[in-house]
Amino acid sequence: TLNYAYYPVFFDGYKYDRNEIQTKLAEHNVFARKYFYPIISEMECYVDVFYGQEFPVSIRASETVLALPMYADLSLEDVDLICKIILD
């Protein structure tokens, strides 16, 4: 099933990390959000449930994925702006 409600992007090995990209976008009033963050095993209510277990794939996703804005009225000009901010 496809989901067109989010546009998650991995910033893994890019010249900027996920947090830097989020900050750069916010400086231009473009609001993206951390995706898969925090992972469930790090939430206080589940710490005892997952104590001692490691989830390297989940941790990697929680540190590198950013959900970019995507909605029906998003103009091509805004898409171009988001891409320019990320590439610059």
Image (tube, rainbow, N blue to C red):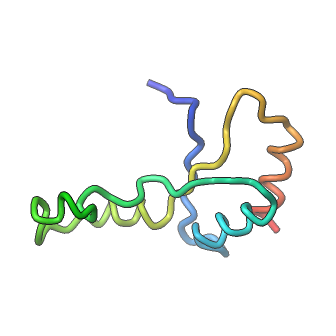
| Rendered location of residue 11, percent (x, y) | 57, 64
Q: Is residue 40 left or right of residue 66?
A: left
> How many numbered dots are placed on residues in this image?
0
Q: Looking at the image, which residue sits at the far front?
A: 45
| Rendered location of residue 57, percent (x, y) | 32, 61
* Residue 26, image quadrant: bottom right
Q: Looking at the image, which residue sits at the far right?
A: 77
Point 89% across, 42% down: residue: 77
Point 85% across, 48% down: residue: 80
Q: Is residue 81 left or right of residue 1?
A: right
Q: In the displayed structure, would residue 3 be above or below residue 21? A: above
| Rendered location of residue 79, percent (x, y) | 80, 44
Point 84% across, 35% down: residue: 75
Q: Is residue 2 left or right of residue 77?
A: left
Point 57% across, 54% down: residue: 33
Q: In the displayed structure, would residue 73 be above or below residue 80? A: above
Q: In the displayed structure, would residue 61 be above or below residue 3? A: below
| Rendered location of residue 66, percent (x, y) | 56, 56
Q: In the displayed structure, would residue 77 be above or below residue 54? A: above
The image quadrant where one finds the N terminus is: top left
* Residue 71, image quadrant: top right
* Residue 48, image quadrant: bottom left
The image quadrant where one finds the C terminus is: bottom right
The residue nearer to you, when weighing 61 against 20, is: 20
